[in-house]
Image (tube, rainbow, N blue to C red):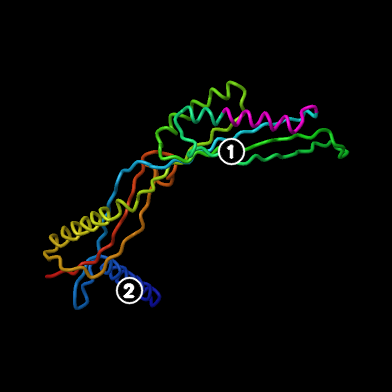
Amino acid sequence: MMLKQYNMLFIAIGIALAGFFISQTLVKSNESFNTIRVKGLAEREVKADTAYWTVSKGLKTSDDSISTEYLYQQYEKDTQAVYDALIAQGFTPDEVEIDVANITFYDLRDEDNNLVETKRTLTGDINIITNNVDLVKTSRTSLNQLIAKGIALTNKEPEYHFTQLNAIKPDMIKEATQNARIAAQEFADNVGADIGGIRDASQGRFTILDIGESYSDTKKLTKTVRVVTSVEYYLDN
């Protein structure tokens, strides 16, 4: 019987504490002043302004009759073909950068560790950095014609970024704060109080995500920018 009474006491204390924390979250009512803390959200739909795109090329051979010099000459020829195709699409020379070439040797051995053959792979990248994001999207398929001509390449997925955040920050913070005020006013109207001055305010970080996505931020041209402000107002009875 005594144990049952203790259990009932602990349950009652737990319920009371739970109610205390809930009331603290909504309104601080047991102090010399009452306050309410609300959040305001602002969103913008924006278009990416910068694209990063990489086209990788590779030549591979295990034919010892083909010299490394000849392999490199073929690599240079293929590289020039990709470069020319990109320029023909409308990219400027400043937007297209040919990276360094890398050669790798792979030794293939039998079960007795005897050398069977050596494969040589020559690889390199062409990097495109541009503000003409629409041109990147339309140009990717054009490189398929080079593949049909026997040029080995990897057409990597571009990354699209929005870099003009500072230009929209002030208006978004203002909008988020106004939305917080609207939420506070609605609450005050419901409890028969008036909104006073601001006791405390904080701003969350800006987030940029691909539109309709919850984690990706580089795959789509269209982005969603969000910011949340948290504002604590005095309540006047």
Could you say which disc has been placed on residue 99 in the image?
Answer: none
Find the distance from the CA under tag 2 to the CA under tag 1: 67 Å
Q: In this view, does 172 lie above or below 58?
A: below
Q: Is residue 55 above or below residue 199?
A: above
Disc 2 and disc 1 in contact, CB within 8 angstroms: no
- Lateral position of residue 156 relative to residue 198, left or right: right
* Magenta segment, prevailing SS (helix, strand or loop): helix
Q: Position of residue 15 (x, y in %)?
A: 31, 69
State the residue at coordinates (67%, 31%): 59
* Numbered range of the magenta stretch: 65-81
Q: Quadrant of residue 204?
A: bottom left
- The residue carrying mark 1 is 125
State the residue at coordinates (72%, 40%): 104
State the residue at coordinates (23%, 56%): 174
Q: Position of residue 21 (x, y in %)?
A: 30, 69
Tally of numbered tags: 2
Could you say which disc has been placed on residue 13 in the image?
Answer: 2
Q: Is residue 71 above or below residue 200?
A: above
Q: Is mark 1 on a helix, strand or loop?
A: strand
Q: Quadrant of the C terminus?
A: bottom left
